[in-house]
Amino acid sequence: MKNTTATLQKQKQQQEKISMLTAYDYTTARLVDKAGINAILVGDSLGMVMLGYENTLAVTMEDMIHHSKAVARGAESSLVVTDLPFLSYHTSIEQAVLNAGRLLKEGNAQAVKLEGGVEFQEVIQAITRASIPVMGHIGLTPQSVHSFGGFKIQGKTEAAARKVIQDALAVEAAGAFAIVLEGVPESLGQLITELLTIPTIGIGAGRYTDGQVLVYQDMLAMYDGLQPKFVKQYAAIGDEMVAAFEQYHQEVKAQIFPADDHVFAIQPEITATLRQEFGGEK
């Protein structure tokens, strides 16, 4: 069954947890989809884990469209949600709608995600008015890393927590079908989840959100950068990959690979005739 914005809403109503992971290419999307994950996020986190940037700010619309198309080709059942990158929806409502439309039309996404709360309520309203599903993202919003002074937990004081709640309510009122809550205290994540009628997807927001999302390179120990407290590493795939690459390197050097099982053959007399004709080594 294909996951949609409606099936995610039904999961919240039935108190069934929602699973979400990132993917940025066809192969990974196929594997995530095969695992039964409800939704795939083509996150602007690709700037860090795929392109090697320090943060997400350098990611372009072209980057997002390129990766979104690849993921969409691999996701048969998972809902594909693609990030609007930094400055793609900030300067005007018209620009925001056009870029959101590009992610669906060119990137084959089924929904878009954007960061921000009260300040972006009109933007979310305009995009949803264009029949483009929007997933909100509040709390620790990576595109605001410089204004936050780093990747810091949000909502730890009463005033800050109130602001996060106001953002959540504004995003829901604007027509978003779901909200990512990132980097907030668990009790705040629980309260917001209780207040909203739309699903909440947590990342570092505790156990009581309607669902969870992780960057797959983090949960597979494939990324050497920032390792947040909220990440659980389910497998050391990064170490396994390095070990495999090292073994390959050693076997090539030692002429162990390719072996008999990996080569093709023709009749020896054909090679002998060609060697004589072209003067190859005896």
Image (cartoon, rainbow, N blue to C red):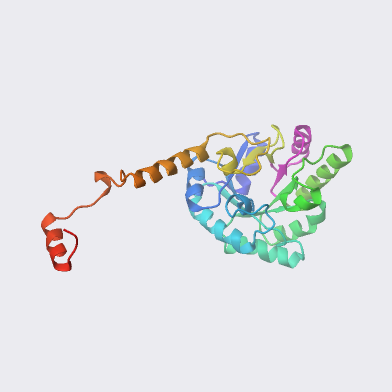
Residue 149, horizontal then vertical, whole percent = 80, 48
> Image point 77% across, 35% down: which residue?
185
Residue 231, horizontal then vertical, whole percent = 64, 36
Quarter of the figure with residue 226: top right
Residue 31 shown in magenta: no
Q: Is residue 58 visible?
A: yes
- Is 166 left or right of 249, judged from the image as shown? right
Q: Is residue 21 above or below residue 271?
A: above
Residue 273, horizontal then vertical, whole percent = 12, 63
- Is 221 left or right of 206, judged from the image as shown? left
Q: Is residue 73 above or below residue 166?
A: below
Q: Which residues are magenta?
A: 177-201
Which residue occupies the foreground of this view, 153 or 78?
153
Image quarter in which the C terminus is found: bottom left
Q: Residue furthest right?
A: 159
Quarter of the figure with residue 103: bottom right
> Image point 75% across, 33% down: which residue?
186
**Count of numbered circles in the view:** 0
Which residue occupies the foreground of this view, 188 or 54?
54
Q: Is residue 43 visible?
A: no
> Image point 77% across, 40% down: which residue?
153
- Is 172 left or right of 62, judged from the image as shown? right
Q: Is residue 138 above or below residue 208?
A: below
Residue 184 shown in magenta: yes
